[in-house]
Each structure stands twice: as C-alpha cells, then as structure tokens.
Image: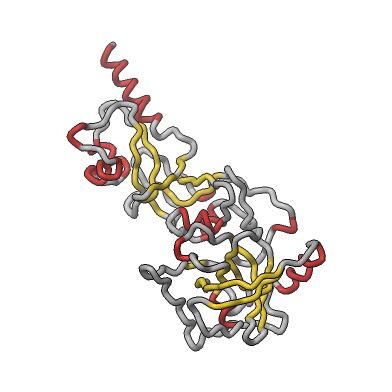
Amino acid sequence: MKKIIALFIISFFSLASFAQTTLLVKSNDKGLYIAHTVAPKQTFYSVGRQYHVAPKDLALFNDIDMANGLNIGQTILIPLNGANFSQTGTKGTPVYYQVGEGEGLYRVSVNNGKVLMADLRKWNNLGSDNINPGQKLIVGYLNAEGVADVSVAATPKKESLPAAEVKTEEPPVITPRKPEPEKQQAASVPQPKQTAVADSKGGYFSTAFERQSLTTSGKKEQTATSGIFKTASGWQDAKYYALMDGVEPGTIVRVINPTNSKAVYAKVLGAMSGISQNKGLDVRISNAAANVLQVTDTDKFIVKVDY
C-alpha cells in the first residue's frame, strides 16, 4: 500500500508540473526563463533531461550548488535556449508573455529575444498592433519531454477589434540594429538597386493621415532627432513606419526632411524609451522612409514631425 501511495504522489507531482494551462515567460539579467516546481525524486539531471538543459547550466542559472541537490516543492528557473525554445516554428507547447503597462507589440518583441512582430501577429491571431496590459501573447514554443505538442491551431482566439482598426496591409518585419559600445553603429545604407517607391502623396498612409486629421482635434508638431531602423517594408509598397514615444501605436505621422522639404507618412509601431540603443533619439523611421527623404546622415539627423 505504501508503495502504491508513493507512486501516486510521484505521478501527481510529475503531471502537475506540466498541467499548467499557460507557461509564462519571464526574464532576468541572464535571459528568458520559465518556472518549474520540483517533484519528488527529481534532480538536476532529471530536470535537465526533461527541459533539454545541461545540469550545470541549470545550477548556474539558479545560482545553486549542485552538491546541495533539489527539494520537493522548490521553484527553479528553466533557461530558454536554442535547444528547448523556438521562436521560428510552431512545434511544442506555447510559451506566453503577459503584456505590461505601456507596452506595445514592438516592446514585446524586444523583451522576448526580438521575436519577429509578424510571428507575434500570426501566432496570436492579431488583426492589428493594438494590445492591452495583462494580455497574454505567445512568444515562442517550448520543446520539453512530458509537455504535449500544441499546434498553431490552438493559439488564442482572435481578438475582437473595431473594423477601423483592422488593417489589411502586410506588417513590416523589423531587424533592430545593434549599437557599438558607447556609440551607435551607423545604419546600413540600402543597396544601389534598392530604391524606395514613393508617389507625390508621400506613401501608402497619406490617405489615412488625411482621415485622421479630420477626427483629431489640435495639431501636434515637433522638431525631432531621428535614427533609422531596418525593415523590408516600403521599398516596393511605399508603406513607411516609425517608432516614437508619447504617440499611440497606429497613429500616422508626417515626417519632413527640413533640408529639402521632402515628406513621407509613417505609421507608428510603438515606443522607444527604455532601449539603450535609442538613447539620444526622439524617433526612428524605417530605412525606406529615410531613402525617400534623401537623408544623408544615416546615424542621427533632424526631422520635423506632425500629426
């Protein structure tokens, strides 16, 4: 009887550790992780095998001496790495991130290994970039023994959004630029054959800017220090984008190069604050937009913004 009870307890704890309906990702100075509650008879080696993490790496991530072992009920942090966590496919169990106050989709991307925003939209059935504090978004998939595979079909139900907020255009794929130590690296200059297409109206979002002006009271203008971020959008479809603090994501802004009066209309994707590589900048515009504005200084330059 005692053996049966012991086996039942072991089975219960083993199943309970994977019975979570939601795996929530968090991060610290060592990287992304999920929490695991130690079950009876589990060791650094068994947990490491379970999550595809080397036992010594598990101990190091948790600042624990392996000689001390693990205790039943103890919470340990499971580092997410290339061996157990994918942000390119949909095989495995979804791992979620809970949106914080003031976070847009771009910030969620940055906070979770710079996962592509296009994948965030696809995995979470988002019709727009509008997200809410407390909302849980899939940011990748966990590959671990004992966790049932969940296909992309099991992603959250599509959010109900006002018709005006649902966009039909294909959102951009952003590749943030990495700064050099103490100095931001200059943005890559587009290849000679890569020339952005812009009509006399200033791009795809010009009509949306006009509609927005009719429903917005008061015009805001500012002279801003700008940088550039790289995206595949804009070169052929004239869809330009911007990152800017204090402006609601989805807002269309007009960006003007004061040196030649050229202008483009850009959709704001999210904020910039809190990211070290944005220090000293008020706004970032997509590289295709900068190309149309004929920006010569690709590191830092002045623009006028109104909306």
Q: Quadrant of the C terminus?
A: bottom right
Q: Residue at 69% x, 48% y: name it.
A: 160
Q: Quadrant of residue 17?
A: top left
Tell me residue 290's x, y (percent).
57, 79
Q: How is the image coloured?
A: secondary structure
Q: Is residue 17 above or below residue 243?
A: above
Q: Residue at 68% x, 69% y: name it.
A: 253
Tell me residue 212's x, y (percent).
76, 65
Q: Is residue 161 above or below residue 281?
A: above
Q: As drawn, is 92 to the left or to the right of 249? A: left
Q: Is residue 173 above or below residue 53?
A: below
Q: As drawn, is 143 to the left or to the right of 102? A: left
Tell me residue 170's x, y (percent).
61, 66
Q: Is residue 224 above or below residue 116?
A: below
User: Seen from this angle, which residue lies furthest left?
Assistant: 67
Q: Quadrant of residue 36?
A: top left
Q: Nearer the viewer, residue 132 or 147?
A: 132
Q: Residue at 34% x, 42% y: name it.
A: 78
Tell me residue 162's x, y (percent).
73, 53
